[in-house]
Image (spheres, helix red, strand yellow):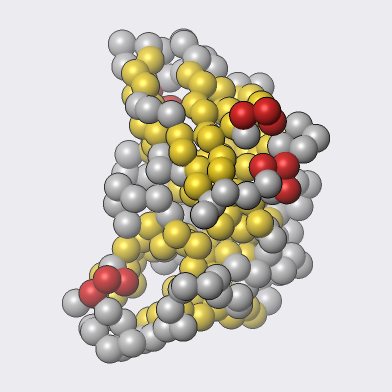
Amino acid sequence: QVQLVQSGAEVKKPGASVKVSCKASGYTFTNNDINWVRQATGQGLEWMGWMNPKSGNTGYAQKFQGRVSMTRNKSITTAYMELSSLRSEDTAVYYCARGNDGSSDYWGQGTLVTVSS
Amino acid sequence: QSALTQPASVSGSPGQSITISCTGTASDVAIYNLVSWYQHHPGKAPKLMIYQFIKRPSGVSNRFSGSKSGNTASLTISELQAEDEADYYCYSYAGGDLFVFGTGTKVTVL
């Protein structure tokens, strides 16, 4: 069965970076994009960007351009999202999701990133 | 790249039908056949309910249906049940390899 398992919660100081991992299993990793979505406390879902595991190509929401990097390691079927220059507003639950036909059909369990001094 | 517009809340009694709208623009919902809907219970991962406007993934109840008119997509939940109480989000391709979510709608079962 398709599964996306994310890394554990993180606490970071303002200005630092965080790297969240997303381990995929149950399907051919290179056949589907990986999308990254976040939800800040009390806010709605926010699309951050996508990464194609086969080519490594990426597309980022304008809001995160220059601050986000989405990569992968095909040998261990794992995708990564790194967000830099963290500020308090980046405190959120971050999700990875498998892209399929313009939607996200399977989701990771979410990773809480807390930014606090 | 602005969020799609949804009503903040919609409510209904058990057994009733409700409809959630999702209004985009001529640059997203109107021209791409790639709108999906997600159910999100607090503390859990979002769940895909509808994709490509009207298609239902395997395992999703047929009480959930989608439609489109112009630049507005809609999600209808029929025979409302207590378990349907959640937040719902629409999501659309917006061109240029970009996607956008709706503002979200809280569904309350009275």
- What residue sits 65% from the left and 69% below the top? B52
Task: Judge whether residue A70 can be spotted in this image.
Answer: no
Q: In this rendering, would A37 be left or right of B84?
A: right
| Residue B23 sits above or below residue B16 on the image | above
Please provide percent x and percent y for residue B100.
60, 51
Task: Judge whether residue B96 can be spotted in this image.
Answer: yes
- What residue sits 56% from the left and 40% below the top? A24
Q: In this rendering, would B85 be left or right of A65?
A: left
Task: Judge by depth and name the residue closer to the eye, B7 or A71.
Answer: A71
Please provide percent x and percent y for residue B60.
46, 73
Q: In which image quadrant can residue B92 be found?
A: bottom right
- What residue sits 61% from the left and 25% below the top? A68
| Residue A3 sits above or below residue B15 on the image | above
Please provide percent x and percent y for residue A37.
52, 42
| Residue B15 sits above or below residue B25 on the image | below
Please provide percent x and percent y for residue B83.
27, 71
